[in-house]
C-alpha cells in the first residue's frame, strides 16, 4: 500500500525534469515552484515534520496516532524525496536519444513515456529501492507516535523498559529488511538493464 | 527541393551574440547526396538542425518543396519531422530496446495517415476517416521492419540490443530506424565520424545504395573530405559561419582559381 503511494513522486519528478531549462518542454516558472516545493519537503527532518503536521493529520484522518496517522507525514516527506530521485534518473539520460526521438517527430508525451521512462527504468528502480529503505527508517520513527511496527517495539520495550535484547533484535531485523530491499532492487535493476554485452 | 535562403542563426547569451550561421544560401535538388563540409565550429551542425527545426533559425527561410518550414510549430512541426529522417555521430539508439524495437520506433509513434505509400495520394488517406487515427498494426510494423533489416543487412541481429553491436552495426540500425517512415530527406550528422575507415566505407556504400533505390535526398555534414568525395554529387564548404564555396564535388575540389576554396580545403585536407 505504502509502496504505491510512493509513486506520487513520479509525476512530480517527471514534471521537474521536463520543465527545466534545456528540458524537452521548458517552463521556468513551474520549474522554480516545483524546485522550492521539493527543497522545502527535503529540508525538514522527518521526526520534526512528523510532529509539525499533526494538525493536518487530524484534519485528514481524524486522529494523530496509529498507522493511518503516520501515513500522512510519510507521504508529505517521501513525495519530494522520490520526485528528486526520479528527476535525477531522467537527467542522467543521454540527451542524444531524446534528440533523435524529437527528430523523428515524437511529441513530448511520447518522449516521456516511450523514451525517457523506459530508458531510465533501471536507474529508477534503484532510486525506488533507495527510497523504500529511507521509508523503513521513517516508519521506525513513526513508531514513536504509535504507528506500531518495529519502531514502536524498539522504543516502548527496548528503550522505555530497558530490554536491551529486544532492542537488539529489532535492530537486526531492520538490518535484514534493508539488506533484502537493497539486494532485491539491485537484482531487478540489473535484470532490466540491457546495456550489458554478450547476452540476450 | 530544399531551398535555403539567407539563413541566419544567432545564439544569444547574457552579454554577447554569437552568429553561427550568416546568410546561408543553399539549393538542394531531389535525389542529391549533398555534402556540407567544414571544420568544427563552422556551423554545420546548427545548419543541419535548422532543416528539421531542432534549432530555430533567427532569420531567413527554408523551403521544402516550396513550403517555408521555419514558421511551423506544434502538430505541423511534428508532421514535418516525420518526413525527415536523421542519423547521428553517436547513433543515439534506444539502449533498452532491441534492434527490431529501435527500428519500429518511428512507426509506433505515428498514425497511418502520416505514412506515405507509393500509389496512394495523401487525399486517399484523408478521405478514409478510418485511417485518421489508426496506428500501425503489429504485423504491418513487422513487415516493414523485416524489409529494413534486409536493406541494412542485419537480419541475424534482430533481437540483439545496441550494446551488443559494433559501431557500424549500430549506425545501420540508426539508418533503418530513420528510413522506417519513408522520409523524403535523410540528414546525416557526422554519421561516420565515430567509425573506422573500413566501416565508414561500408556505411557510405549503404547510403549510396539507399539513395539510388529510394531516391531519398541525403544531406551529409562532415569534416572528412573523403566522405564527400566518396558519395556526394554536390558540396558546399562552410567556414566561419559562411558558405565559401559551392558546386559539384569535382568543381569545388579542383577549382584552383578560387583562393578561398583552396585555403579552406587545404587547411584541413592536407
Image: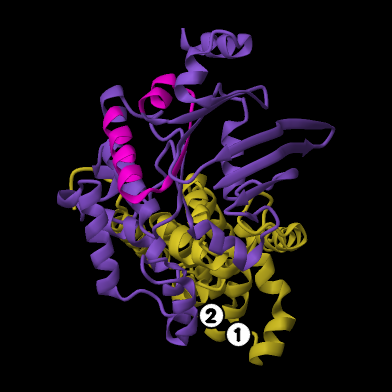
Chain colours: A yellow, B purple
Q: Is mark 2 on a helix, strand or loop?
A: loop
Label 1: which residue?
A: A65
Label 2 marks which chain's residue?
Answer: A
Q: Is residue A13 visible?
A: no
Question: 10 Å neighbourhood of mark 2: few (<14), some, or many (≥20)?
Answer: many
Question: Which residue lies at the image location 70% right of the left edge and 79% below the top edge?
Answer: A54
Residue A3 to residue B162: above or below: below
Total number of numbered discs in the rendering: 2
Question: Which residue lies at the image location 64% right of the left edge and 65% below the top edge?
Answer: B74
Label 2: which residue?
A: A147
Which percent across, then down, holds residue B73?
A: 66, 61
Asked if disc 1 and disc 2 are in contact, CB closer than 8 Å, the reply is: yes
- Does the stretch in magenta take in B209? yes
CA distance separating discs 1 and 2: 6 Å
Q: What element carries label 1?
A: loop
Question: Which residue lies at the image location 47% right of the left edge and 46% below the top edge?
Answer: B30
Label 1 marks which chain's residue?
Answer: A
Q: Give the range drawn in magenta.
A: B201-230
Farthest-out residue, right? B15
Secondary structure that dominates the magenta span: helix
Q: Tell me: B46 left or right of B266.
A: right
Residue B215 to residue A78: above or below: above
Question: Which residue lies at the image location 45% right of the left edge and 78% below the top edge?
Answer: B125
Q: Can residue A145 be seen in this view?
A: yes
- Does the stretch in magenta take in B111? no
Amino acid at each position: 500500500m505504502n509502496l504505491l503511494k510512493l509513486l506520487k513522486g513520479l509525476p512530480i519528478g517527471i514534471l521537474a525534469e521536463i520543465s527545466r531549462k534545456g528540458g524537452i518542454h521548458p517552463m521556468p516558472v513551474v520549474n522554480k515552484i516545483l524546485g522550492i516545493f521539493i527543497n522545502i519537503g527535503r529540508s525538514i527532518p522527518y521526526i520534526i515534520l512528523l510532529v509539525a503536521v499533526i494538525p493536518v493529520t487530524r484534519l485528514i484522518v481524524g486522529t494523530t496516532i496509529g498507522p493511518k496517522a503516520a501515513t500522512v507525514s510519510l507521504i508529505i516527506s517521501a513525495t519530494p524525496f522520490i520526485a528528486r530521485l526520479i528527476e535525477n534518473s531522467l537527467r542522467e539520460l543521454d540527451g542524444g536519444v531524446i534528440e533523435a526521438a524529437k527528430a523523428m517527430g515524437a511529441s513530448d508525451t511520447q518522449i516521456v513515456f516511450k523514451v525517457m521512462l523506459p530508458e531510465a527504468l533501471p536507474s529508477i528502480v534503484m532510486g525506488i529501492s533507495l527510497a523504500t529503505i529511507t521509508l523503513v527508517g521513517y516508519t521506525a520513527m513513526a513508531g514513536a507516535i504509535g504507528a506500531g511496527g518495529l519502531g514502536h517495539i524498539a522504543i516502548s520495550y527496548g528503550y522505555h523498559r530497558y530490554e536491551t535484547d529486544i532492542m537488539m533484535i529489532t535492530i537486526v531485523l531492520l538490518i535484514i529488511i534493508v539488506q533484502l530491499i537493497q539486494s532485491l532492487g539491485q537484482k531487478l535493476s540489473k535484470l532490466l538493464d540491457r546495456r550489458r554485452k554478450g547476452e540476450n | 527541393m530544399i531551398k535555403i535562403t539567407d539563413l541566419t542563426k544567432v545564439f544569444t547569451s547574457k552579454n554577447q551574440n554569437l552568429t553561427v550561421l550568416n546568410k546561408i544560401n543553399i539549393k538542394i535538388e531531389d535525389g542529391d547526396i549533398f555534402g556540407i563540409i567544414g571544420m568544427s565550429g563552422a556551423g554545420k551542425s546548427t545548419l543541419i538542425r535548422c532543416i528539421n527545426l531542432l534549432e530555430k533559425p533567427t532569420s531567413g527561410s527554408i523551403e521544402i518543396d516550396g513550403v517555408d518550414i521555419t514558421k511551423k510549430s506544434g502538430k505541423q512541426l511534428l508532421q514535418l519531422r516525420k518526413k525527415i529522417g536523421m542519423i547521428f555521430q553517436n547513433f543515439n539508439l534506444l539502449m533498452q530496446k532491441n534492434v527490431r524495437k529501435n527500428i519500429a520506433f518511428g512507426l509506433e509513434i505515428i498514425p497511418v495517415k502520416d505514412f506515405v505509400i507509393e500509389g496512394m495520394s495523401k487525399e486517399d488517406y484523408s478521405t478514409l476517416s478510418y485511417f485518421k487515427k489508426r496506428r500501425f498494426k503489429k504485423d504491418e510494423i513487422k513487415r516493414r521492419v523485416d524489409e529494413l533489416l534486409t536493406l541494412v543487412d542485419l537480419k541475424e541481429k534482430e533481437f540483439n540490443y545496441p550494446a551488443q553491436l559494433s559501431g557500424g552495426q549500430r549506425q545501420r540500425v540508426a539508418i533503418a530506424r530513420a528510413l522506417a517512415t519513408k522520409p523524403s530527406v535523410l540528414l546525416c550528422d557526422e554519421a561516420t565520424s565515430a567509425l573506422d575507415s573500413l566501416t565508414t566505407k561500408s556505411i557510405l556504400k549503404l547510403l549510396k545504395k539507399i539513395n539510388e533505390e529510394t531516391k531519398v535526398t541525403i544531406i551529409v555534414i562532415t569534416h572528412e573530405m573523403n566522405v564527400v568525395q566518396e558519395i556526394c554529387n554536390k558540396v558546399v564548404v562552410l567556414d566561419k559561419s559562411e558558405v565559401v564555396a559551392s558546386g559539384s564535388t569535382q568543381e569545388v575540389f579542383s577549382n584552383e582559381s578560387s583562393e578561398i576554396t583552396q585555403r579552406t580545403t587545404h587547411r584541413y585536407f592536407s
